[in-house]
Amino acid sequence: MRVPRPSLRHGTASTVFAVASTALLGLASGCSKSSPSIIDDHGVESQRIAGVWWFMFIVAIVVYVVVASLIVTGVLRRPRHTDELVESDPMTPVTKRDPADARWIWIGGIIVPVIILTTLAVLTIRVVQTTRQPSADEVTIVVHGQRWWWDVRYPDGDVRTANEIHIPVDRTVNIELHSDNVVHSFWVPQIAGKLDVMPGQTNRLRIKATATGRYRGQCAEFCGIGHARMAFMIVAESETDFERWLVRRERDASGPTSEDTAEGQRVFMSETCSGCHTVRGTTATAEIGPDLSDFGSRDWIGSVTVRNTPENLKKWIRDSHLIKPGSLMPPITISDDELAALVAYLEALK
Ligand code: CUA
């Protein structure tokens, strides 16, 4: 009886297609410009991590090429004795095996993976250890993961801000991570690896930016409805700019300079705003929501969800849930004139 064989041509085509599409998918997955890449590194820690990444990538390419070549060779190579296929019963297991087969299973299935995985484990542990070393002149920044934003404090200057974290370049920054709610994860791919933010525990992440710039960070642990919009920005600046920024933040927020902003401040203090937010130098000292003392100098609203423009701020104040579902800020019902004044006041806070 002749055993039906799958069409050799069809089998080859689909194998080659599978091999090629896997390679293309792998390449395409690293091409998005909208999200920061770990191999576009601008930090000492991310450089080390990128080193491990490149090592893994090269090993993966080698493994892929070897395995794909074996698959393609296996499909293309015709059996040496076609008679065996014609006569064999498909229900009878093949018992005769070349001893060389078993040797290759040991080498390819056990020895090589063990060598690769052990090398990777050693490399990873070494990188993790070197990224946690304290430094004598480090700057400490205390970051609290909130639902769903980042509360940022500079203990040296008694300064508080939110979501946009200013750091000096070429200096170690010790980020102390806290949470009093759920587990978050602090991750700025271009600067350093991620570290979980655990309730009841202080985790320390040491980072060192090597170039000035703005680097997007993201909460990397699912923490509830606002998780995807719990981003932040690392603003790495020169030592002089950083010191200037810190000194400015130690002073009170700028007061109203026009009738409009004065009316806005009155609205801020009389409405629910002051019940949750702080504006340095005023009677608003609540710490439930982000500190707004430097709100006008921030680029973003809602943890890097939308740009900080008067129009977006109006929408945010009216009903922040339309921009960020799950936001804990309640909708504010005020007249259009009051809203315009409030927005003018907030945008003027520098
Ligand atoms: Cu915080 Cu996810």
Image: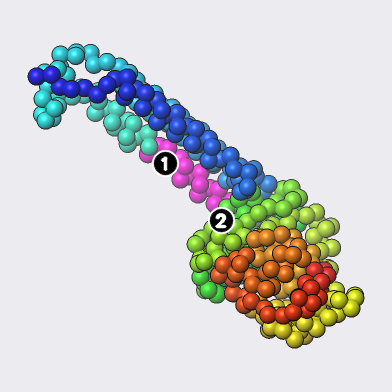
Q: Is the residue marked by circle 1 packed among few (<14), some (14-19), or many (20+) residues within 10 Å?
A: few
Look at the magenta stretch and give its main secondary structure: helix
Task: Note whether 79 is above or below 313 in the view shown.
Answer: above
Residue 290 location, x and y as percent?
68, 73
**C-alpha separation, residue under disc 2 versus residue under disc 1:** 21 Å
Task: Note whether 62 is above or below 156 in the view shown.
Answer: above
Residue under numbered circle 1: 117
Residue at the image point whose x is 42% and y is 42% from the top = 118
Mark 2 secondary-structure assignment: loop
Task: Note whether 244 is above or below 345 in the view shown.
Answer: above
**181 sits left or right of 159 in the view:** left
Residue 324 location, x and y as percent?
60, 66
Mark 1 secondary-structure assignment: helix
Disc number at residue 165?
Answer: none
For the N terminus, the image quarter is top left
**Front position in the image: 108 or 22:** 22
Q: Is the residue marked by circle 2 packed among few (<14), some (14-19), or many (20+) residues within 10 Å?
A: some
**260 sits left or right of 283 in the view:** right
Three-letter code for the amino acid on which mark 1 is drawn: Leu
Residue 256 location, x and y as percent?
87, 77
* Quarter of image, res 75: top left
> Which segment is the magenta one?
114-136
Disc number at residue 194?
Answer: 2
Residue 109 sits inside the magenta stretch: no
Residue at the image point whose x is 80% and y is 60% from the top = 242
Comparing labels 2 and 1, the label whose residue is closer to the camera: 2
Residue at the image point whose x is 68% and y is 60% from the top = 306
Question: Reading the chain from its start, which is encountered first: label 2 or label 1?
Answer: 1
Residue found at the very far front of the displayed protein: 336
